[in-house]
């Protein structure tokens, strides 16, 4: 193996590992930390026990193990082996094991002392995978409580070492400087003026590939956010393919043979373009790569605890990821990186990768913690704590599955954890075991169903159809996995005399996904959706979902959804895998999912009381019948709840009770010392039970609603003495000099107004007021035709001022009415001059 930058730090590293139980190693991409370092540890025989190395990705784990074995001129499984879910190659002679996918935490659960191992290496820790974070936390607990001689080595290329050092204050920090070869950069931002990133990306990639082929030698690695973008770009690049150039995809769902085709060296004289997701970002050496084209995008999974569903989002990568990607070009020779963003935008990228623990579904992790005896994430040494909402969701689901009782791990939960698969699917398999005597063959059905769901092969929407395809010779990889589980779990019998019925597929899925039982909710009728129109369902957790109309399931009234995803475009999640569900079978085998609920509610639209007995499954209503045996109190409470939801506007307001409400609000504001309660909308809504509920007796429809004595109800909030004081301090009418009682107009935000004809106010000089004289009344002086002449709170000023101009104009217009020269000394009147 050629000299690599890690070589210079190896002596210091070996010394640190001998003197310290915790070491942090920071080394750039391509330094050799994932391959040369572990090999040197083996060759130097520093440890007598085994070495365990955690890799975050399956492809990297397999390739690293294969490469190191080849350097020793051995096969994988001799001195160097690997463990991953569904694929293990180790032997008694294996001294270095590369593991992934939560294998480390499972090993610790089974052997808390890790008695055969002397060193655990956490490779690519900067990726902040959930398994790495939890694995390190568990390993620290083992080290501190059971094995103080256990060594931990945390390695990364772009690590926030300061935060890690705070968590591991006793750890020694080593840094390997330099990259094998320098990498230059150029920036080629996508034109997004007339298109979205999704639209612009394939064209930008093709243009940059053509530019790179002209400017650079060697092979090209293109980083794209996801499989769909890889396929679109691969299609558009086909015009470049010839006998000297190949275009190869690289992503997790490909077969091992397809992945190796992209990774392995290409024949002499040929060039290749590898289109990859971020699977190629770390720990993989793709032979001959000297050019990287970085889209600057990645597809991230973000879990929503409200819906219990994950959303795939296309996001900008971090600066750390950009550094990692560029480093691929300089592993074997001088390289160049084309970045599809502006150079000035680079500093705006997030510095580090977002930790998976902040955005992941934590159900499996929570179960691991409970089995380990940890009650909360806060008890573990973690760089980041997950959100309370995500933890609450996980614990709620585990409780529903019977894995937790009163927050602690139950025997059922311990059994689920031992399966080493999703708690949902483990619960399905364990329950199928219990049903085997009554439903022969159902355990084997569960094994096949789980193998399909956990496999990498693309499945049809209808899982019943997928099982039929498996029986006819398709999905052989999943079938082999099912057979392995059947052998591992000895309770499963697969002999041919057991019936192979798929009638219980939906029932098994309901065990795993009780929150994803779906009921049809569109208005087109069974199987009648228009061509190309999505068919809509609602899940038992309340989430809306849709599936394509050309699917065979669209005629089903009930489904169980196994796989779905929230999209970036709409509110409804898209269903990818589901199965029809038989309601009768569900009621027989899982009666605990159902509830009978008395539903009494005020229908806001119809303005009437609805009383029903409902059969419910979560938030789904499966059947309704009229409920007659309801008490008056239930009716009143339902009506009150409807009013609270709709707001006070649904009450029978009229001019009289609106005026009272305004006076009450003014009294609260203007006379605070008297104790008038608050009559704002919020206060009234909060206090409905006290002032409105007693007046709702007999209200079942709009006719009774209109008869609610709202004036009486509003007044009931006041003691009798305050009602009297209200009439005194804020009277409904004001007596003017002629003796007329004229209605005052109150307003929440201003002084009350008094509309009165000017002749009735002659001789009035003082300023009338309400609220114990605190709030002057606004006088609206009207013409004989009841039209405004003057608005004032200063009558004396008006008589002595602008009255003369008003008189001059009005006297000619209304000659029959009295327009005295001196209004202060004139007699007020309601009559014309002839009758004075």
Image: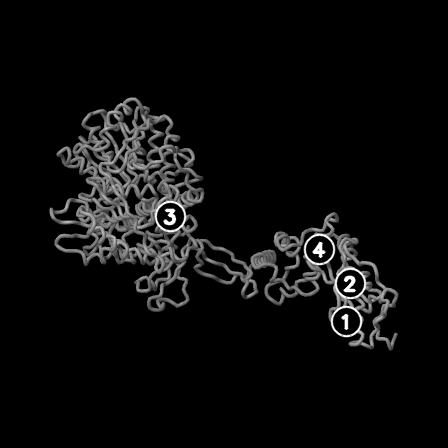
In the image, which disc is placed on residue 783? 1
Q: How far apart in space, not on screen, are marks 4 and 2 (Cα)?
A: 15 Å
Lateral position of residue 203 relative to residue 735, left or right? left
Quarter that holds the N terminus: top left
Neighbour class for label 2 at 10 Å: few (<14), some, many (≥20)?
some
Q: How far apart in space, not on screen, are marks 1 and 3 (Cα)?
A: 71 Å
Residue at left offset 78%, top offset 65%: 802
Residues at marks 1 and 3 touching, judged by CB atoms closer than 8 Å: no
Residues at marks 4 and 3 touching, judged by CB atoms closer than 8 Å: no
Q: How far apart in space, not on screen, are marks 1 and 4 (Cα)?
A: 29 Å
Q: Earlier in the sequence, mark 2 or mark 3?
A: 3
In the image, which disc is placed on residue 302? 3
- Looking at the rendered structure, the secondary structure element under dot 2 is strand
Neighbour class for label 3 at 10 Å: few (<14), some, many (≥20)?
some
Instruction: Mark 1 vs mark 3: give the one in front.
Output: 1
Instruction: Find disc 4 in the rendering and name its residue.
Output: 666
Q: Earlier in the sequence, mark 4 or mark 3?
A: 3
In the image, which disc is placed on residue 733? 2
Q: Name the foreground residue: 698 vs 459.
A: 459
Q: Eyeballing the image, is 99 above or below 675?
A: above
Q: How far apart in space, not on screen, are marks 2 and 3 (Cα)?
A: 64 Å
Residue at left offset 17%, top offset 52%: 246
In the image, which disc is placed on residue 77? none
Tell me residue 366's x, y (percent).
38, 40
């Amino acid at each position: 193996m050629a000299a690599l930058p890690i070589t210079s730090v190896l002596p210091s590293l070996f010394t640190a590992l001998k003197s310290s139980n915790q070491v942090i190693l920071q080394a750039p991409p391509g330094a050799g930390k994932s391959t040369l370092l572990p090999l040197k540890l083996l060759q130097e025989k520093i440890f007598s026990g085994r070495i365990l190395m955690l890799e975050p990705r399956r492809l990297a784990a397999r390739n690293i193990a294969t490469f190191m074995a080849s350097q020793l001129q051995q096969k994988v499984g001799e001195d160097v082996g690997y463990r991953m879910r569904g694929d293990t190659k180790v032997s008694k002679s294996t001294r270095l094991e590369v593991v992934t996918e939560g294998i480390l935490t499972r090993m610790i659960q089974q052997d808390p002392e890790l008695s055969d191992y002397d060193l655990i290496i956490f490779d690519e820790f900067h990726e902040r995978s959930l398994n790495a974070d939890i694995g390190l936390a568990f390993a620290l607990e083992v080290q501190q409580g059971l094995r103080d001689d256990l060594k931990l080595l945390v390695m990364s290329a772009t690590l926030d070492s300061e935060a890690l050092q705070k968590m591991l204050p006793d750890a020694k920090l080593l840094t390997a400087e330099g990259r094998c070869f320098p990498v230059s950069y150029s920036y080629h931002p996508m034109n997004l003026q007339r298109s979205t990133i999704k639209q612009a990306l394939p064209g930008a990639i093709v243009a940059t590939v053509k530019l790179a082929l002209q400017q650079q030698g060697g092979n090209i690695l293109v980083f794209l956010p996801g499989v769909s973008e890889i396929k679109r770009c691969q299609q558009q690049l086909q015009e470049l393919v010839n006998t000297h150039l190949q275009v190869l995809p690289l992503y997790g769902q490909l077969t091992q043979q397809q992945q190796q085709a992209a990774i392995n060296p290409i024949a002499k004289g040929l060039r290749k373009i590898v289109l990859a997701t971020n699977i190629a970002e770390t720990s993989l050496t793709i032979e001959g790569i000297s050019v990287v084209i970085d889209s600057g995008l990645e597809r991230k999974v973000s879990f929503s605890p409200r819906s219990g569903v994950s959303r795939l989002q296309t996001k900008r990568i971090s600066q750390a990821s950009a550094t990692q990607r560029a480093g691929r070009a300089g592993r074997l020779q001088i390289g160049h990186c084309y970045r599809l963003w502006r150079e000035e935008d680079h500093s705006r990228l997030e510095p580090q990768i977002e930790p998976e623990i902040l955005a992941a579904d934590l159900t499996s992790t929570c179960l691991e913690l409970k089995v380990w005896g940890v009650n909360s994430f806060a008890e573990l040494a973690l760089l980041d704590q997950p959100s309370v909402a995500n933890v609450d969701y996980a614990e709620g689901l585990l409780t529903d599955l019977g894995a937790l009782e009163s927050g602690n791990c139950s025997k059922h939960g311990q059994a689920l954890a031992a399966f080493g698969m999703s708690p949902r699917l483990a619960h399905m398999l364990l329950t199928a075991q219990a049903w085997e005597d009554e439903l022969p063959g159902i355990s084997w059905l569960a094994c096949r169903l789980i193998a399909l769901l956990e496999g990498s092969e693309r499945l049809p929407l209808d899982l019943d159809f997928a099982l039929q395809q498996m029986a006819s010779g398709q999905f052989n990889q999943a079938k082999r996995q099912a057979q392995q589980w059947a052998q591992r779990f000895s309770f499963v019998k697969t002999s041919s005399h057991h019936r192979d019925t798929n009638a219980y597929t939906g029932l098994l899925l309901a065990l795993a996904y009780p929150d994803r039982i779906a009921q049809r909710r569109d208005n087109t009728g069974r199987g009648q959706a228009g061509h190309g129109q999505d068919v809509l369902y609602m899940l038992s957790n309340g989430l809306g979902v849709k599936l394509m109309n050309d699917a065979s399931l669209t005629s089903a009234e009930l489904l169980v959804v196994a796989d779905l995803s929230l999209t970036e475009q709409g509110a409804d999640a898209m269903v990818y895998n589901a199965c029809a569900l038989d309601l009768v079978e569900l009621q027989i085998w899982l009666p605990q999912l159902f509830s009978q609920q008395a539903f009494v509610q005020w229908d806001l639209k119809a303005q009437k009381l609805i009383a029903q007995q409902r059969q419910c499954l979560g938030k789904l209503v499966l059947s309704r019948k009229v409920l007659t045996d309801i008490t008056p109190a239930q009716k009143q409470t339902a009506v009150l709840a409807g009013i609270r939801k709709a707001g006070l506007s649904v009450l029978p307001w009229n001019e009289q009770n609106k005026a009272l409400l305004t006076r009450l609000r003014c009294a609260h504001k203007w006379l605070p010392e008297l104790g008038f309660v608050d009559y704002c909308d919020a206060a009234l809504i909060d206090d409905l039970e006290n002032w409105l509920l007693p007046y709702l007796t007999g209200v079942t429809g709009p006719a009774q609603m209109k008869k609610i004595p709202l004036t009486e109800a509003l007044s009931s909030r006041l003691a009798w003495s305050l009602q009297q004081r209200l009439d005194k301090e804020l009277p409904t009418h004001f007596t003017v000099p002629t003796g007329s009682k004229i209605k005052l107009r109150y307003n929440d935000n201003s002084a009350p107004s008094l509309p009165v004809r000017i002749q009735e106010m002659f001789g009035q000089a003082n300023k009338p007021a309400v609220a114990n004289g605190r709030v002057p009344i606004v006088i609206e002086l009207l013409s004989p035709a009841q039209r405004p002449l003057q608005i004032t709170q200063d009558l004396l000023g008006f008589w002595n001022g602008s009255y003369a101009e008003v008189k001059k104009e009005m006297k000619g217009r209304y000659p029959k009415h009295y327009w005295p020269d001196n209004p202060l000394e004139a007699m007020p009147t309601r009559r014309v001059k002839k009758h004075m």
